[in-house]
Image: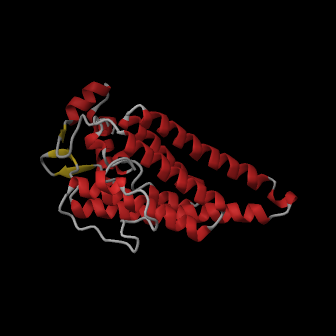
Amino acid sequence: MDAVRRGHLTPGARVHEVGLARALDVSLSPVREALFRLADQGLLEHRPRRGFYVRTLDEAGTREIYTFRALLEGFAARLIAERRRAAGTASPLEGSPGPNREAEVFAALAAQIDEGARAARRGDRRAVAAANARFHDLLVRAAGHSLLERSWALLAPAEWLLHPTWMWMDEPIGPEEAADWIARHQRLLEVLRTGDPEAAEREAAAHVREAGEGNLLRRFPLARVPEHPSGTPGNPGAQGTAGREKGAAE
């Protein structure tokens, strides 16, 4: 997993089972079991009698990932906003644990934005990607919905699904791209804080779709991307177009 995330194993690369077992100083059996699990999760592809290879996503596969994520994260944002609204209307006795929990959730999300912002300002794309992955994982898990988390687990083990620009991780992030990443995540957090479930769901889904469509265009320049009423992909406002133009930070 770490080798894929860091780009040491690129799409289509062979994963050598014997070499892994030697490097980890374990027998071949647990290595094969782990590789089959990664194949089930979509990170690897098992080719009978040939071995394991890093999965190469085509245009359709890339689109499936970000559209599924948009559904999951939009639902997560709705649940968080509903809980936020309920905590604001509860009596002091009934709501005493709620506001503390929500404050912790928002503080954790804000901390990842701050960490990503610091990394973005110094041009460290890998560090931004890691903060981005943690932000979105926190968002889903903060919803407190077990079936949602099980669905998320289909994607989360393959970290490149959370920051799909890993093939370009050695490219530094520029000031415009950094500013866009910070603004988009701050905007999502502020919408969550309003306690408006509909707005939170729309914003989170649009956030994921915009980034996904940008990455789709970067990987497949001739891909067809649906236009939304605002004229920009995903986001109902006219902001955040750098994600589409550059297919960059999510």
Residue 206 visible in image: yes
Locate residue 68, reporting x and y percent.
39, 64
Between residue 123 and residue 151, name the one nearer to us.
123
Q: Is residue 84 left or right of residue 166?
A: right
- Measured as percent of width and height from the top left, residue 248 is found at 33, 48
Colour scheme:
secondary structure
Quarter holding residue 214:
bottom left
**Residue 122 shown left or right of residue 145 in the figure:** left
User: Residue 48 location, x and y as percent?
Assistant: 15, 51
The answer to which quarter of the image holds residue 143 is: bottom right
Q: In the image, is residue 26 above or below residue 79?
A: above
Q: Is residue 38 above or below residue 18?
A: below
Q: Kindly tell me whether residue 144 is visible in this rendering.
A: no
Point 57% across, 46% down: residue: 109
Q: Which residue lies most toward the left here?
A: 49
| Percent position of residue 239, x then y | 44, 59
> Nearest the camera: 24 or 163?
163
**Residue 183 versus residue 143: which sits nearer the camera?**
183
Q: Identify the residue shown where x is 51% and y is 62%.
A: 148
Instruction: State the image quarter where residue 108 is shown.
Output: top right
Q: Quadrant of the N terminus?
A: top left
In the picture shown, does residue 32 fall above or below 205? above
Residue drawn at point x = 75 percent, y = 53 percent: 99
Residue nearer the viewer, 193 or 134: 193
Give left or right: position of 190 versus 163: right
Residue drawn at (76%, 62%) of the image: 88
Q: How many marks?
A: 0
